[in-house]
Amino acid sequence: MVALVHDLGRPARFINTLWVLKVTSPMSVGTWLLSAYTPLALAAVGCAVTGRLPRGGAAATIGAAALGTGVATYTSVLLADTAVPAWHDAHRELPYVFAGSAAAAAGGLGMLAVRPDHAGQAVRFAVLGAAAELTAKSLLLRRLGPAAEPYQKGRAGTMLEAGEVPTAAGLAGAVLAGRSRAAAALSGAALMAASALTRFGVFEAGRVSAGTRSTRSGPNVNASANRTNRSPDSFRHAPRPDPPRASSYARLSRCDRTRHQGP
């Protein structure tokens, strides 16, 4: 929520986006999702920590869980709705990549926060999320083919490949940690780091893709700019085109035309 307000520039803009809900706008839908999810999540955590208002905490937990999928994936829809080739072409798999990444990070945070005896749900959630993320990422690269180059090379490729290492390590640790608190904590931290690397890798791939596109279209843009920004002197000293040549009938004198037409 704070990051969204900072990205919009002024808090007043965030309030203005709540006046109208546009279901065709990922930004509008995401703003409404965050506005509803944040207080529900805070209420659920507060009730769980303090032990007060258990029914209210349960209701808040159910509401936050219902909105959690939208909160986890709306940023992927926001990216895919742009004209950036790497993001737009991956519109089918990006929501699943982001959902799996968010689930793995949430499970990892749960493994960090609770004792291994009570971390069974967090472990299952992390395993499911990591498996979904890796599967969706593999399908994305396979479907795009050569167009997936921004995700495989450069800084973005390094981030995405590096993210798979802590994902695998976190999965192995989550399954084999047992009752070891240290192993569970390390596995949870690895899953959270892997999720962050995946998000930043996708973001970097879009930046590289947008830069490549602007570079390829650069000569045409420069030529158009040169035509637009020509000085008046260049037009003044430009060679004038030759006047159109008159037809043979037009070159005839008046008398000749009269004689040619007859009485």
Image: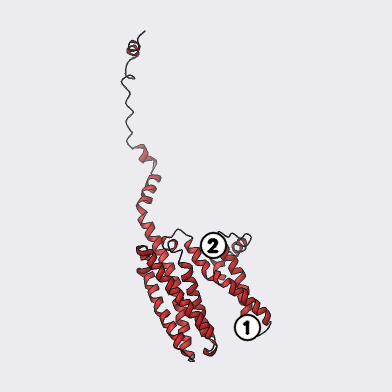
Q: Secondary structure at mark 2?
A: helix
Residue highlighted by disc 1: 48
Report the residue at 36% width, 50% height from top: 220
Residue 25 percent location from the top left of the image? 55, 60
Q: Quadrant of the C terminus?
A: top left
Asked if the residue under mark 1 is in contact with the one under mark 2, i.e. CB atoms within 8 Å, the reply is no
Number of other residues with Cα within 10 Å of mark 1, as a class: few under 14, some 14 to 19, many 20 or more: some
Q: Secondary structure at mark 1?
A: helix
Please, what is the three-letter code of the amino acid marked with disc 1?
Answer: Ala
For residue 262, side relative to residue 52 (left or right): left
Report the residue at 53% width, 90% height from top: 117
Q: Is residue 27 above or below residue 114?
A: above
Q: Quadrant of the N terminus?
A: bottom right
For residue 231, side relative to residue 4 (left or right): left
Report the residue at 59% width, 68% height from top: 33
Report the residue at 36% width, 57% height from top: 215
* Colouring convention used in this rendered image of the protein: secondary structure
Please, what is the three-letter code of the amino acid marked with disc 2?
Answer: Pro
Label 2 and label 1: CA atoms lie apart by 32 Å
Identify the residue at the far left of this view.
248
